[in-house]
């Protein structure tokens, strides 16, 4: 069986986990904390050990292995690298999502490496950490793939600067497993023996927790929130009760390398460990700036030489982004051009130590739009953020609107946004990440006298956003629209002077930065913002009315009669896309949808019924070249023995015991029903011991494909 290379880039999650303060405490006890480090175990001022982060991703690990179609009998946790963005709160809800990023081939006898990356967010909106882990798949190498990069960490050739001794108790895995990793290998002696061990072994990630505590204790005691990165390779197993030693070498102001050894045999259990932590200055800076920062991000802002665009650029730069300031430098009606607006904004950023560059292209042409993005990519290799902000005004009433006046406004606002967004979107898709903000206006959303060109362009941008939100959904691209109100040169003539002074562009900046950040949870939204007031605008649809039977068109008179319910917006409903918006109409005339509602109480499915249906659920196409006999031993009151014989793309199912099965699957009846009903993840079932497989374990992984219920 070969690995599924198509899984690369595939999204995993979101997986949600709620936790209370007792979870980090239980984790801390599981990794040996006690009276010596009360801050980890006492709810009064509780601090969370950073390595607790892995407790939120066990299901993610399982999903990764399933997506890659790894041979489970050869799987080991290879490496774990955690990047911390914010301290972990003692309780809340964690949402983790990510993707399988790479599969490397070390060679036929050496195995394969499956790499996945998961970002975890707290319900409070903060991004907490990024876990990058490597699964070492001992039996999946030799498929002719790239061996991947070789990285190594040098352990200094001298005595360690610090050593931390610990003796995990003989019962340590029993406590540690309560944090989520309930793999039978750490509790079931019989299972451990089948896997080649004398008895249950320590969880590698439990030793990892001991090492995490040790480095904090010696390098930044009492401040786990300063941990910035913690990576390690798992190299050997150890039995509970064996003394361990974490050796630490400081290699820089804020970095150290470490390893953990078996103190009896001197075998290295955790190797090539590296820890990085924040200086107190950097920690203070992060605290001051709050949690949203743009370190390493590249932002392109059109029309950033003045007004709102410049305010966005300054704050993005202050928070770490590299900024491309695009501005044509013309008059408010778009006539003329000058490099000075963009140059001055760039200078201002550089004076404060930021990184910025100017682009003077007009967004109003396709070449101009492309040149803006090309410049950012040439300078910094990527585009993470695009704010479409450039704008002009040429107000006329419709009666006096000339095609040129109409077109020039369309060209800057609507066409301009297309010209810049298209190449940026392509780049973002390639990167698998992007944030796009469009700028609409109350004139477009609600209408304004003398602005039919401007209102049309501004509303057109919402249509553009609506489609991109769907097209970019699976590429990590989030797109939203802002309707600002601010005192700038565009509004000087229309806003009374006292109000003009109060409507500072800086009041619009916070929400735009939030929408540009990794934290941004929304896509396809429109927000009004000004002077510290923010609200959401949306297209909503009323419940509607059914007139007639869908066979004969109703008359205008019938419409007149029913107009009150047709125009009613009570209750309003928002739809994510055009198809879902059609569903009330289709449902209204679909008798099945009515019947479906009335068919309550489906008969409960039984284990025996599943085996009865098995031949119908068989997929001959997936069985090409497969010869296998699966024996199912299902315990519990609804259980029994069944076997299926797969041969020559055919399947038979019988009750009883086969004499010579290829693979035997053992489960209890409830777990089996949960598994078949998609409520129990097969990998979780396997690692927790709920699903026991004997014989050819690889063939068992085909079951998923051979039968579709
Ligand atoms: P602004 O005039 O201060 O800034 C707009 C910038 O866009 C200018 O620096 C201008 O040189 C640049 N620009 C114009 N045409 C360009 C082109 N073809 N290529 C590149 N750059 C170009 O105006 P403000 O108020 O900061 O406007 C920013 C955006 O916010 C505009 O899209 C505007 O329509 C929108 N808006 C502003 C409101 C407000 O109350 N200020 C209200 C609603 C929307």
Image (cartoon, grey):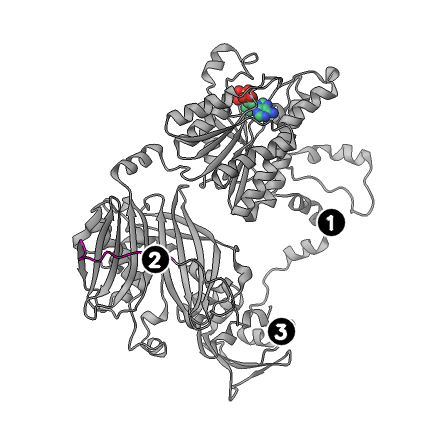
The circle on residue 367 is none
Taking depth in this image into account, of 315 and 184 the one nearest to the observer is 315
User: Is mark 3 in CB contact (under 8 Å) with mark 2?
Assistant: no
- Residue located 48% across and 58% down the image: 102
User: Is mark 2 in CB contact (under 8 Å) with mark 1?
Assistant: no
Taking depth in this image into account, of 273 and 288 the one nearest to the observer is 273
The segment highlighted magenta reads 151-161
Earlier-in-chain disc, 3 versus 2: 2
Asked whether residue 404 appears in the rendered view, the answer is yes
Asked if disc 3 is less than 8 Å from ligand 1, the answer is no
Quadrant that contains the C terminus: bottom right
Q: Residues within 10 Å of mark 1 (few under 14, many from 20)?
A: some
Per the image, the residue denoted by label 3 is 618
The circle on residue 152 is 2
Quadrant hosting residue 628: bottom right
User: For the residue labelled by badge 1, is the local secondary structure a helix, a strand or a loop?
Assistant: loop
- Of all residues, the one furthest to the top in this rendering is 497
Per the image, the residue denoted by label 1 is 589
Q: Main secondary structure of the magenta part?
A: loop
- Image position of 306 with respect to 520: above or below: above
């Amino acid at each position: 069986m070969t690995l599924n290379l198509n899984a690369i880039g595939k999204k995993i999650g979101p997986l949600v986990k709620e936790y209370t303060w007792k979870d980090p405490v239980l984790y801390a006890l599981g990794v040996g904390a006690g009276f010596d480090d009360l801050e980890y175990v006492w709810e009064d001022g509780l601090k969370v050990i950073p390595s607790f982060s892995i407790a939120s991703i066990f299901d993610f690990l399982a999903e990764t292995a399933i997506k890659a179609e790894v041979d489970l009998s050869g799987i080991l946790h290879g490496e774990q690298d955690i990047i911390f963005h914010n301290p972990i709160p003692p309780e809340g809800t964690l949402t983790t999502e990510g993707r399988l990023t790479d599969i490397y081939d070390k060679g036929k006898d050496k195995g394969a490496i499956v790499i996945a990356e998961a970002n975890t967010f707290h319900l409070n909106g903060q991004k907490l950490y990024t876990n990058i882990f490597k699964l070492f798949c001992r039996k999946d190498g030799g498929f002719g793939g790239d061996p991947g990069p070789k990285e190594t960490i040098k352990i200094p050739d001298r005595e360690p600067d610090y050593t931390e001794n610990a003796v995990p108790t003989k019962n340590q895995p029993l406590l540690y497993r309560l944090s989520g990793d309930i793999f039978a290998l750490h509790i079931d002696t019989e299972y451990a023996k089948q896997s080649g061990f004398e008895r249950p072994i320590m969880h590698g990630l439990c030793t990892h927790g001991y090492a995490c505590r040790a480095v904090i204790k010696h390098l930044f005691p009492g401040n786990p929130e300063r941990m910035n990165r913690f990576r390690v390779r798992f190299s050997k197993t150890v039995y509970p009760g064996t003394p361990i030693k974490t050796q630490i070498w400081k290699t820089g102001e804020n970095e150290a390398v470490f390893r953990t050894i078996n103190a009896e045999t001197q075998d290295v259990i955790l190797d090539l460990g590296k820890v990085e932590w924040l200086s107190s200055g950097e920690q203070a800076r992060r605290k001051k700036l709050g949690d949203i920062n743009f370190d390493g991000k590249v932002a392109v802002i059109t029309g950033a030489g003045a007004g709102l665009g410049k305010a966005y650029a300054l704050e993005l730069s202050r928070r770490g982004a590299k900024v491309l300031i695009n501005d044509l430098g013309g008059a408010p009606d778009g006539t003329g051009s000058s490099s000075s607006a963009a140059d001055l904004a760039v200078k201002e950023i550089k004076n404060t130590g930021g990184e910025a560059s100017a682009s003077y292209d007009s967004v109003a042409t396709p070449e101009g739009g492309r040149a803006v993005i090309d410049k950012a990519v040439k300078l910094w290799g990527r585009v993470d953020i695009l704010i479409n902000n450039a704008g002009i005004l040429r107000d006329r009433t419709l009666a006096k609107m000339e095609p040129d006046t109409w077109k020039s406004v369309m060209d800057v606002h609507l066409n301009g946004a297309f010209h810049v967004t298209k190449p940026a979107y392509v780049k973002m898709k390639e990167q698998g990440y992007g944030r796009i903000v469009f700028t609409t206006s109350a004139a477009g959303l609600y209408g304004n006298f003398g602005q039919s060109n401007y209102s049309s362009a501004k509303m057109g941008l919402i249509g553009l956003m609506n489609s991109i939100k769907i097209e970019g959904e699976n590429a990590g691209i989030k797109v939203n629209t802002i309707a600002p109100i601010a005192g700038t040169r565009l509004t000087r003539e229309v806003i009374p002077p006292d109000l003009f002074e109060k409507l500072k562009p800086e009041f619009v900046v916070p929400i735009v930065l939030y929408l540009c950040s990794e934290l941004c949870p929304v896509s396809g939204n429109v927000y009004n913002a000004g002077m510290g007031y923010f609200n959401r605008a949306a297209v909503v649809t009323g419940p509607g009315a059914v007139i007639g039977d869908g066979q004969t068109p109703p008359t205008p008179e019938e419409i007149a009669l029913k107009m009150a319910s047709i125009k009613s917006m009570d209750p309003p409903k928002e739809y994510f896309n055009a198809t879902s918006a059609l569903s009330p109409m289709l449902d209204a005339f679909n008798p099945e949808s009515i019947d479906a509602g009335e068919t309550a109480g489906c008969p409960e499915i039984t284990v025996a019924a599943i085996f009865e249906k098995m031949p119908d659920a068989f997929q001959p196409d997936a069985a090409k070249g497969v010869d296998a006999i699966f024996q199912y031993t299902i315990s519990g009151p609804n259980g029994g023995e069944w076997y299926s014989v797969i041969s020559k793309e055919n399947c038979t199912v019988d009750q009883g015991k086969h004499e010579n099965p290829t693979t035997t699957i053992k489960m209890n009846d409830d777990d089996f029903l949960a598994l078949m009903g998609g409520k129990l993840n097969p990998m979780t079932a396997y690692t927790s011991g709920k699903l026991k497989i004997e014989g050819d374990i690889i063939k068992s992984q085909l079951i998923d494909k051979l039968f579709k219920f």
